[in-house]
Amino acid sequence: MNAQVHPDPAPALLETRQLVVGYGGRPVLRDFDFRLLPGEVLCLIGHNGAGKSTLLKTLFGLVARQEGQVLLDGQPLAVVEPRRLCAAGVSLVPEGRGVFPGLTVAETMKMGLWAAGVAEGERQARLDWVMSVLPALRQFYGRRAGTLSGGQQQMVSIGRALLSRPRCLLMDEPSIGLAPKLFQDLLQPIRQLQRETGMAILLVEQNVKQALKISDRVVVMKSGAIIREALPAELDDNAKLMELY
Ligand SMILES: Nc1ncnc2c1ncn2[C@@H]1O[C@H](COP(=O)(O)OP(=O)(O)OP(=O)(O)O)[C@@H](O)[C@H]1O
């Protein structure tokens, strides 16, 4: 008789196995195992230089791995590149927002629709959908991104990332330069969307207190390694957080 085996758990949406990544031959992440599950909001925190952004960029194919695997839906990717990830429903909100200051929001979105490969006939509906998630975009739709406030620029960057209707959003320090209240105002609609659609979010953040408010799980990194995994409630006072820093 066959031995009883447990079925495999559902595959992670994104996963790394024994990943080695670095710059100029010097590894930043070594034998790094990481999982982002479907439908979760995972907050990645840790010291400056711990390798958080490097992980995010590697998952999206912006930094090449030296060794190890990146898996999408449980399948190892032969080539990890933004186009492939984007087509599979993964979208990036880059560090520093990545908006072109000379383009209007309308132009930025037009370019984003094209880059996301949205068919011509669907573009208006897609834009309307993004506006329904982030209605404030309409207030400055005709303005050049360079004339907008930091929070408004971040909203443009997030709106652009949503144009592909992603099932996974990778966000690199979206709170930079924003007051805590503004950050919450910006992230709450995204959390709402996440609850409605089951989109997974990987959020790299320095602003830990604010990020924990919208997260389901926390991973703490130090010097290229994971040193702790926790629920937000387990890190909800300063003393517990200070232990990790
Ligand atoms: N393009 C690069 N070239 C060379 N070294 C780099 C490059 N980008 C990052 N590093 C180095 O890799 C290490 C990890 O950087 P990374 O930006 O991933 O850390 P982080 O945890 O995101 O830090 P922070 O919170 O300060 O953004 C650091 O030592 C950094 O100096």
Image (spheres, rainbow, N blue to C red):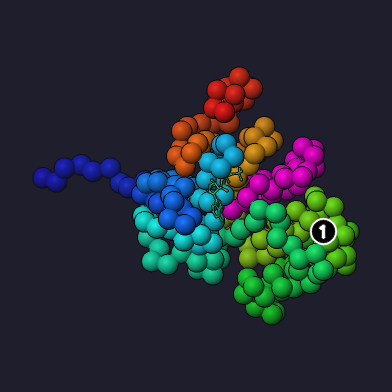
Residue at 51% across, 31% down: 230
**Per the image, is 227 magenta?**
no
- Residue 204 appears at what percent x and percent y? 60, 45
User: Could you say whether the residue bearing mark 1 is in a helix, strand or loop?
Assistant: helix
From the viewer's perspective, is residue 48 above or below residue 130? above
Furthest-bottom residue in this view? 120
Residue at 88% across, 67% down: 142
From the viewer's perspective, is residue 86 above or below residue 183? below
Q: Quadrant of residue 169?
A: bottom right
Q: Amino acid at mark 1?
A: Leu
Front-lying residue, 105 or 215: 105
Is there any visible trace of residue 159 in the rendered image?
no
The magenta segment: 170-199
**Which residue is identified by label 1?**
137
Front-lying residue, 206 or 131: 206
Considering the image in quadrants, where does the N terminus appear? top left
From the viewer's perspective, is residue 1 above or below residue 242? below
Magenta span: helix, strand or loop, mainly? helix
Residue at 75% across, 40% down: 184
Q: Quadrant of residue 93?
A: bottom right
**Per the image, is 178 magenta?**
yes
- Residue 234 appears at what percent x and percent y? 55, 25
Residue at 67% across, 65% down: 163
Considering the image in quadrants, where does the C terminus appear? top right
At label 1, counting other C-alpha atoms closer than 10 Å, the crowd grade (few under 14, some 14-19, many 20 or more) is: some
